[in-house]
Amino acid sequence: MARAALLVSSILLSCLVATSYGATISSLMRTLVVTASPAAGQVLKAGEDKITVTWSYNNTFARGTDSTYKTIKVKLCYAPISQVDRAWRKTVDDLSKDKTCQFNIVTKPYNPSNNTFTWTVERDTPTATYFVRAYAYNSAEEEVGFGQTTDAHKTTNLFEVHAISGRHTSLDISSICFSAFSVVSLFGFFFIEKRKAKSSQQK
């Protein structure tokens, strides 16, 4: 009986430990150096423009700090100015609940140096102000380090993305041509009717 109770307690404890883990952004060390090609304030067009991201291990940290790093995930993240009154973009310290970085740029095996990736901004990216962040994951897929292109307050090196409006130049030109044709046709109709009226009066 005692052995069974001990077994149940062990299982419950294991479950508690497994469910209690949750990385927070405030607990992670900024062990990655991340840069992105857009200049501060630059405006990119969704579906057209590209972002080149580079990342590497921050060598100011002690050797071996990255010993558990297995995977890097680079993400496009909302800047605070584009999170105001938008709960679906809210920053939460608990990374399992955080909604800051919703767009995956690339996932790659961890390499401490010489990492570069060029990404075309996806067509469904909303109009907003952004920065780029990279997370390091261990073998259990837990966040264990990070880096980003902006400062801790997320106010520097920000850039914008403008979403696709849904209108195309060819459609706009067709619309203008159709409108012009309609106006010309209307004037032509009145001119013909006027001439018919004059001909009838002369007879």
Image (cartoon, rainbow, N blue to C red):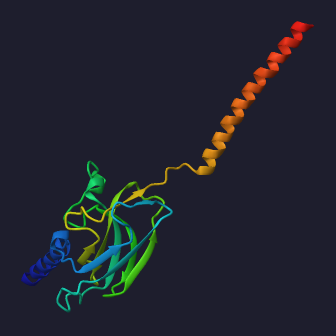
Residue 38 on image: x %, y %: 38, 67
Report the front residue among 6 and 167.
167
Residue drawn 26% across the image and 68% down it? 150
Residue 98 vertical position relative to residue 35 in the rendered view, above or below: above
Residue 36 on image: x %, y %: 36, 72
Quadrant for the N terminus, please: bottom left
Residue 90 on image: x %, y %: 25, 56
Dividing the picture into quarters, in which one does residue 74 lie? bottom left
Report the front residue among 57 and 104.
57
Residue 17 vertical position relative to residue 102 in the rendered view, above or below: below
Residue 170 on image: x %, y %: 63, 50
Dividing the picture into quarters, in which one does residue 138 lie? bottom left
Residue situated furthest left in the rendering: 2
Quadrant for the C terminus, please: top right
Asked whether residue 139 appears in the rendered view, the answer is yes
Dividing the picture into quarters, in which one does residue 109 lie? bottom left
Residue drawn 27% across the image and 52% down it? 87
Residue drawn 49% across the image and 54% down it? 164
Asked whether residue 141 appears in the rendered view, the answer is no
